[in-house]
Amino acid sequence: MHALIINRGDARWTPEGHQVHGFAMHERALAMKLGMTYEMVAADNLADVEAALIRRPADVAFVMVSWKEDPEAVTRLFRSLPEWSGRPKLVFLDYYAPASSPFFGVLPHVDCYFKRQMYRDPSLYSKEYEGGNLFTQHVSQSLGIDLNGWTFASVPDPNHLHKLVHGWNLGVTPHYRNLLRLTGVMPLPWERRPFAVNRRLGLSAGPRAVTEWYHHYRECWGDALESLRAEYRCTGSHRIRLRYYFAEMILSRIGVSPFGWGEVCFRDYEVIASGALLIKPSMEHLKTSPDIYVEGKTYVAASWDASDVADLCRYYLAHPEEAKEIIHNGQAALTKYFDQDGFVEDVRRVLDRVGLGDLPSQTARMVPVMV
């Protein structure tokens, strides 16, 4: 079985890149367990996507398009694709941060719609929300934060809702795997970590700083953590250079990670891979992979409005053994995903959805191609 991965590039520290790193990380396992080879094609626009689909033979095509594309144009593209002999199964590769999407119009024209995270209750997609999803509606209605007209939404055709499948998210990257291995081999004990709470929330700074609605949401979390500075040694809250950020995270006991454009954030995996305790708004409404969001087991769930986050920090700083157990579980869950080819099982779940999961195993040469 040959797969075509039409992507937005594989740059480090980007949502687009993190969505496709897993293929190279698990190249051998994909071939051995699924008989799957793949070809990477970078597409900058919809014309590139169409050309790749028509000119490059494959059994299945994972198609990624920019969130900036016009949803109607994307739907037209998939609707217009001819039913030629040997056309691949089509998987729309949704790498977007929110659980919602403006591209559900493609559902009738693809075999599977992949989301890096999705609602546990698919019926939630049949409802309309301010801003497009549960999170933005909470930000607007409960916290009074102005979305300034921002929305990222569409309502899927209920007859095609069964095509939705959750897959892997931006936690699947060699950088987090390597950091996890490093902190596993050379762990820094809880007691020797000088920073009690890591507050690097990416808050804007300076007179020219551009703020979006989610920045204001994170400012609410920053304000909620402010009282801890008088009691414990905490980090700052603004951005710093990447190498200092990771060094600081390894030196922290707790890492707080509020939502951003969507619920799953780079920071979630950085906290766990660094060996710190992840405290984050409750994720009980979502499913994703690698699943590091088991409340009270692998992370600590806080209220979406941050009303209890400071007290949760105080509690676990006063109960280090409980914190260490959750940290251990979180790292074990992520380690298991990497070591036991969790990515391969995620791919298998997608292939099962499009009817290719039972194809006989066969191996072939991997051909990385960029256009």
Image (cartoon, grey):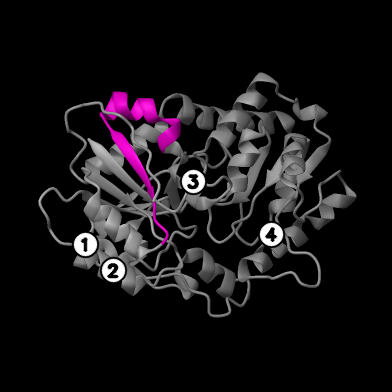
Give the vertical position of 42 relative to 356 (above or below): below
Please say if 51 is above or below 186: below
Residue 291 magenta: no
* Number of residues whose C-alpha sits closer than 10 Å to that of mark 3, classed few (under 14), some (14–19) or many (20 or more): some
Q: Amino acid at mark 4?
A: Ser
Q: Amino acid at mark 3?
A: Asp
**Which comes before the other along the chain, label 1 or label 3?**
3
Amino acid type at mark 1: His
Q: Secondary structure at mark 3?
A: loop
* Label ID, residue 109: 1
Distance (Cα) linking label 2 and label 4: 41 Å
Q: Is residue 155 visible?
A: no
Q: From the image, tell me which residue sits under label 2.
A: 75
- Residues tagged 2 and 1 counted as in contact (Cβ below 8 A): yes
Distance Cα–Cα, label 2 vs label 1? 8 Å
Which label belongs to residue 307? 4
Q: Among all residues in the image, which is located at the extreme bottom?
A: 149
Q: What mark, if any, has residue 129 been given in the picture? A: none
Secondary structure of the residue carrying numbered label 4: loop
Mark 2 or mark 4: whose residue is earlier in sequence? 2
Q: Nearer the viewer, mark 1 or mark 3?
A: 3
Q: Nearer the viewer, mark 2 or mark 4?
A: 2
Q: Residue at x 73, y 51 (%)?
A: 200
- Of mark 3 and mark 2, the one earlier in the sequence is 3
Residue 188 lies, in percent from the top left, at 75, 26
Q: Which quadrant of the view contains residue 357?
A: top left
